[in-house]
Amino acid sequence: MRRKLLFTLIATVFVSIALVGGNLIAGNKPSLGLDLQGGASVTLEPKGDFDTAALDVAVEIIRARVDSIGVAEPEIIRQGSTVVINLPGVKDQQRALEIVGRTGEVLLRPVLQSGMRNTDETTTTIAGQTTLPGATSSTVAGATTTVAASTTSQPASSGGLGSSRRPMSAATTTTPITSPATTAPSTTLVVAEGSVATTTVVAADGAATTTTVAIAVPPSVPQQDISMTNEPSKQAILEGRDGLVYFTGPSQADGQVFANDAAAQINNGSWVVAVGLRGGASGEDKWNLLAAQCFQKAATCPTGQIAIVLDGVVISAPVVQTANFNGSVQISGDFKEAEAKDLAKILEFGAVPVRFDSPTAQTVSATLGKDSLNAALISGLVGVLLVLLFLFFYYRRLAIVVLGGLAISGMLQWSAISWLSERNGLALSLSGITGIIVSVGVTVDSYVVFFEKLKDDVLGGKTLKNSASRSFDSAWRTIVAADTVSLIGAVVLWFLTVGSVRGFAFFLGLSTLCDIIVAYFFTRPTVILMSRSKWMNGAKMFGVRARRTDGGSDLLAESSTEGVVAR
Amino acid sequence: MSSRWGRLYNGETTIDFVGRRWWGFIASGTLVLVTLFSLLFQGLNLGIDFEGGVAWEAPVKNGLTIDSATAILEDNNIESRNAKVQTLGSGAGERIRVQVDDQTAEVRSAVQKSLADTAKVEAGEVSVSSVSSSWGRSITVKAIRALLVFFLLVSMYIAWRFEWKMAIAAIMAMVHDVVISVGVYSLLGFEVTPSTVIAFLTILGFSLYDTIVVFDKVHDNTGRFSASRVSYEDIVNVSMNQVLMRSLNTSLAAVLPVLSLLVLGSGVFGAVALQEFALALFVGLLTGAYSSIFIATPLLSILKSREPKFRSLIGQRSLKGDMAILMQTGSSVSRKQSARSGVDNAGTKVNPIDAVTAVLSHPPRPRKKTRR
């Protein structure tokens, strides 16, 4: 029994220290919420009807944008359909709203040229598509004039992916189109060093990337007509997800030509994406108009590829394999399962774009945050010290158990918060810190319940040694009952509220759990072991007068009122 | 150690809580009435998170005053009549808070810049928060719904763990806490923010914890006294006195950090955000501690003493010395011998059968007397 208790105690202490140590070594530390470190916070709520898959995509878009502007430790939290975006260090609310407020849309653009992005510093040019029929006479496809025609064939042919062009087994698909864009950069696009023949050299996407990209833009196209930022009505140079760079024509349709039924499926052993077309002028007709141009490799679509562009990034650029689509489209390629599903999701998002409202936006000044943090920490520590002082006065040596328990509880909470900060983007907000400070009161409550029970028993004439274990059993029931109520509160709040209340619920739940763990695995063994030691021998050591030995109980039963209470 | 404090310290108080229950009920009734009136005539000072709107907070520096802040609003074509402009905190942490209706993002930025310019600080030093009114409404609805679900689940749990009458008493005490706290906020015109709501929820949990500890004791004692004819009021009184020190201790242990937050955090350091929390926590802790002693348990005794088992014993209370004996021995031995009794006879006449069974179940008195 004794050995078991000792083992429990040592294990608890060891595990707590190991958790803290592990987090320290891993470099995890609690990340601070916006109200403590300053920054901008925006809440987004989808407007009108939306689709869960589409919302996922929208959140991904926002995440990508936030990443691209290089905000340190951004926080993007989904709370039901609400999205909370915290951008620490961003001071301008308007800028934050610009970054995340507008949602991307899916555009369909004909691909004029595509090329590889250079990854090294030497500006190697890439060749556009030159072998396309009719390209020479066109104003757009004039790559021939400037580019060393090292490219000889269409990328589409490389994969031989057109092999899936045969009667489809899936009813929803009529005509496959292949998607070389999702395969590895195709070898048919030859990077010819020395053939520097570009008229413009542009860094793709302006921002973070410094990679130089060369696309041969025909001199006949005025510079200002080329958009680097996915403007639908202009030609645009866009990055592809596959590492290629695409020079695309003006957008001719958007994702809404598709029906809301995109699905990844297996066809002849490989993953394809099938999607229906909406009927009528805004759906099938629009798509077929574009598809026809590309199938014929007309001047407006010399590569035969249609770029599916999401938020300025070419997700996929399949080659059109038929002129006329009837009701549905199938995109095949060398997809992995995840890629196919991702594309399906994006098409779904395109079909039913999610529009956001931003019902709340907030910026907190960094100094204000720091002041709050300091004030909370200092006054919290002082408060805890006062509590300990009081307990020490009241329970004497038993207060050491409380000190130890608070330390264990603190270590557990710190570890959990640090770990979750790193993993789940949890941030410690002011309400969280307050919750933790207040939870000290709850934790102390558990001890008081236990200690008072212990005192009762000892006053009743039992020895400390005998009563410690029994008192705990009885106190344990009370603690569990009371903590269960706290947990119910935490869970209800977590599921039914949003924003800071929800964050608070988490910390309430966490501290309650720690309370239960510490009570059972630390307080119980410690007190029972202490009660057996000589050190605690003598009731005075924990604030109870010495046990009556003078037959006080007899006196008690027969005595008058005064005799009992005013001893 | 014979002082009052000494008795309290050793858990030997014999306070007749049940006998004084009307004090608590009358006091609480008055407070609830005051709350209702205050809500009717003054309403609640809801923050923008519940009503929607925009708020700026700028440090008081370089001639940024309430007047200049109001002027900035006028410059941006915002009706300054409807604006709430106030100063918060003190000393270095003193800030001006300007609160108006919903504004566009452009206006929000413009005012932020103007305020920053006037105070000669960076724009980032001026905090801005905006909440649309529909969002505010949905937050309020969600909070209330969460509260109701919480009440429901907790009463179900207490009913299952203890009994439904305890659930009713506990929930009544919680509702009491909410109402009184709302009353304090309405009466004193404090602003209700999400922090306030969070703080209240914490306190509800805390107050409930307190109540449950008392009820647990009552539960225990009901079992302990079940063999003897002890009125429910006695059980409650004994339990209350037994846990009184614990209640005071825990309340003190909880109030100390909160006081520290309030006095040190928001008073000395001037952290406004802390003030919101600490104030609500403080108000809530006081009502919570009060209600578990003066509302929850007396209510329980009223509900329970109507039960057949206890009905015949209504009004019988062992006071002072008798209560002490009851606490020590677990039975109300002294009643018949005590000069104070005499109620006992009346009680048995009301329901003789009940009395007989009770007497039969009684262990022989002499043995009890010398026990232990």
Image: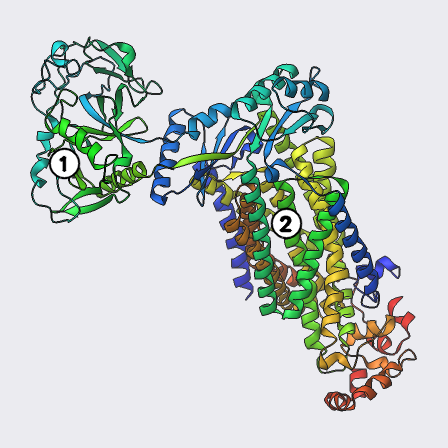
| As drawn, A300 above or below A449 | above
Q: CA distance from mark 2 to mark 1?
A: 59 Å
The residue drawn where x is 84% and y is 59% is B6
Residue A154: give x, y in percent of width and height: 10, 25
Q: Secondary structure at mark 2?
A: helix
Residue A258: give x, y in percent of width and height: 25, 38
Q: Which residue is mark 2?
A: B202
Residue B90: give x, y in percent of width and height: 74, 27
Mark nearest the camera among 2 and 1 is 1
**A167 or A344, which is in the foreground?**
A167
Q: Which residue is mark 1?
A: A177
- Subunit bearing disc 1: A
Drawn side of residue B321 relative to residue B85, left or right: right
**A20 or A134, which is in the foreground?**
A134
Hey, what amino acid is under mark 1?
Answer: Ile
Drawn side of residue A278 relative to residue B9, left or right: left
Hey, what amino acid is under mark 2?
Answer: Thr
Drawn side of residue A217 relative to residue B324, left or right: left
**B249 or A329, which is in the foreground?**
A329
| As drawn, B240 above or below B318 | above
Drawn side of residue A481 relative to residue A109, left or right: right
